[in-house]
Image (cartoon, rainbow, N blue to C red):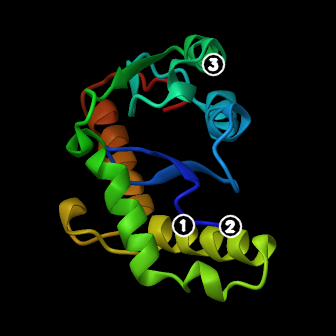
Amino acid sequence: MKIEDLEVIKDLYSNRILEWELSTHPTLKFSTAPLERLVAVLPNTGYQVTLHTDQGWQYQHRNWHRLLHEGRIRQSMSHRSTCLDNAACETVFNKLKAEMTPAKDCADANVLMTTIDEWINYYNEDRIQTRLGSIAPRTYEQRCQIKYQFYIQSNGYKAKENI
């Protein structure tokens, strides 16, 4: 299995990897599986959610668009031959390759998937990120949630559910 066949959905607010999938080759199911899982748990916050992709065929497929519609997600798509448009995810791939046990050293697909899962958990829970004030994505989200709750309570507003 190659790490290049990794699909990730990353939250650009907190840098947290929300969903991911690994496959031996790109198929529609490979691309839609993480989106299906995300749509199933995505809270209805009232905010517009945007999902950015490159121009791969799978992101133009009607099943992909159906899932976006079900999740009330707006699609943003990079311009043709513009690799910088997807730099946020490419950065994750580069860090994964640099910090993780090389894929060729993994005994089989299950070991590779477990290794990637462990790295993504580390990335979300423990890996500090300068852009977030030298804290991990999950910690950043928790601090933002506390600030949001304090703001709502101190101004007499009622907090929205599922935020």
| Res 106 → quadrant | bottom right
Taking the spot 70% from the left edge, 68% from the top edge, the residue there is: 113
Q: Amino acid at mark 1?
A: Ile
Residue 147 badge: none
Q: Secondary structure at mark 3?
A: helix
> Which of the two marks, 2 or 1, is nearer to us in this view?
2
Taking the spot 40% from the left edge, 44% from the top edge, the residue there is: 11
CA–CA distance in space, label 3 to label 1: 24 Å
Going from N to C along the chain, the mark reached first, 2 or 1, is 2
CA–CA distance in space, label 3 to label 2: 27 Å
> Which of the two marks, 3 or 2, is nearer to us in this view?
2
Left or right: 89 with respect to 131?
right
Position in image of residue 114 (x %, y %): 72, 73
Q: Which residue is mark 2?
A: 1
**In which quadrant of the rendered image does the N terminus lie?**
bottom right
C-beta proximity under 8 Å, tags 3 and 2: no
Q: Secondary structure at mark 2?
A: loop
At label 2, counting other C-alpha atoms closer than 10 Å, the crowd grade (few under 14, some 14-19, many 20 or more) is some
Q: Amino acid at mark 3?
A: Leu
| Res 77 → quadrant | top left
Taking the spot 80% from the left edge, 72% from the top edge, the residue there is: 110
Q: Which residue is mark 1?
A: 120
